[in-house]
Image (cartoon, rainbow, N blue to C red):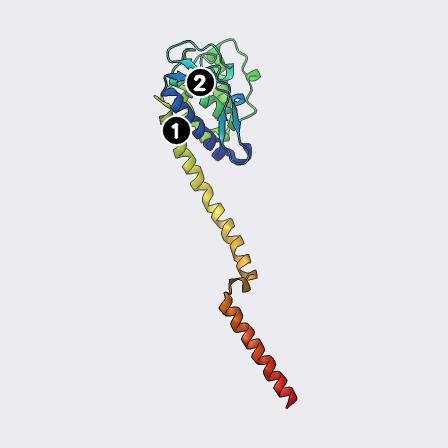
């Protein structure tokens, strides 16, 4: 994930948000959403979600959770099942993917408000996180009504990242495409060209033979 930077984070989160949108349609939340419950195919980048033990019907109390992803732990809402609970966890996952060095051990204050302020201070200092800043803030504040709304914003940022990266990719392609065309001059010939070349060489050989004999 880290090798491909923000683009890979966006690709993963889009898949996760699509998954959450579908389970929310059944009036349940995933509940214990965390990195350990996500498997990603190393080549294809396909996401698979595992461990559904924390799935909880809307309105019920969340019983299975992990502190880092739990909004109640940070004093940002109740430990009760609603769409915003899962989306808060998604934002915390994005934070961890962008800045793996952030760890629960850094935030040990008993005062949850101080704990949250310290986390925000560290997050704001990180350039890796800044591009996703507005999305994270909305998710943390519970302003997304559903997963599709967050999906739309993540998709918009991802497209911007792709647009910013595409000129460099095009330049690399153009730089390398010139050399093979110089080396493969004869590879561009068709059968007619080769037949004509053979005929010319044969005619020249006959002419030389006759000239030498004469």
Q: What residue lies at 41% left-to-right and 30% top-to-bottom?
A: 154
Q: Looking at the image, is 8 positioned above or below residue 37?
A: below
**Residue 2 marker:** none
Quadrant that contains the N terminus: top right
Q: Residue at x 51, y 62 (%)?
A: 188
Looking at the picture, how far across and down is residue 108, in whole percent?
55, 12
Q: Residues within 10 Å of mark 2 (few under 14, many from 20)?
A: many
Residue 78: % across, % down: 41, 11
Q: N-terminal of the two: label 2 or label 1?
A: 2
Q: Residue furthest bottom?
A: 214
**SS state under label 1:** helix
Q: Position of residue 18 (x, y in %)?
A: 41, 27
Which residue position holds label 2? Answer: 30
- Residue at horizontal 37 percent and vertical 11 percent from the top: 59
Of 73 and 191, which appears nearest the observer?
Answer: 191
* Residue 62 found in image quarter: top left
Q: How many marks?
A: 2
Residue furthest to the left: 145
Query: Which quadrant of the figure contains the C terminus?
Result: bottom right
Q: Residue at x 49, y 50 (%)?
A: 171
Q: Residues within 10 Å of mark 1 (few under 14, many from 20)?
A: many
Alpha carbon of mark 2 to alpha carbon of mark 1: how far? 17 Å
Out of 140 and 46, give the one closest to the viewer.
46
Residue 65 horizontal/vertical position (percent): 49, 13
Label disc, if present, on residue 151 of the rendered structure: 1
Q: Are marks 2 and 1 in contact (CB under 8 Å)?
A: no
Q: Quadrant of residue 182?
A: bottom right
Is disc 2 placed on a helix, strand or loop?
loop
Between label 2 and label 1, give the one nearer the viewer.
2
């Amino acid at each position: 994930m880290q090798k491909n930077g923000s683009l890979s984070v966006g690709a993963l989160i889009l898949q996760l948000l699509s998954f959450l949108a579908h389970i929310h349609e059944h009036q349940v939340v995933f509940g214990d959403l965390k990195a350990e419950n996500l498997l990603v195919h190393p080549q294809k980048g396909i996401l698979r979600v595992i461990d559904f033990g924390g799935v909880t019907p809307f309105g019920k109390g969340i019983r299975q959770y992990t502190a880092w992803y739990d909004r109640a732990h940070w004093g940002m809402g109740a430990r009760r099942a609603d769409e915003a609970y899962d989306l808060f966890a998604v934002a915390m996952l994005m934070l961890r993917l962008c800045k793996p060095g952030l760890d629960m051990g850094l935030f040990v204050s008993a005062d949850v408000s101080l704990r949250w302020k310290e986390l925000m201070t560290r997050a704001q200092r990180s350039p890796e996180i800044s591009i996703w800043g507005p999305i994270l803030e909305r998710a943390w504040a519970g302003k997304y009504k559903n997963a599709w709304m967050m999906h739309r914003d993540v998709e918009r940022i991802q497209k911007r990242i792709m647009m910013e990266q595409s000129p460099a990719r095009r330049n690399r392609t153009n730089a390398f495409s010139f050399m093979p065309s110089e080396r493969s001059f004869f590879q561009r010939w068709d059968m007619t060209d080769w037949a004509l070349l053979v005929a010319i060489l044969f005619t020249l050989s006959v002419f030389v033979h006759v000239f030498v004999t004469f």
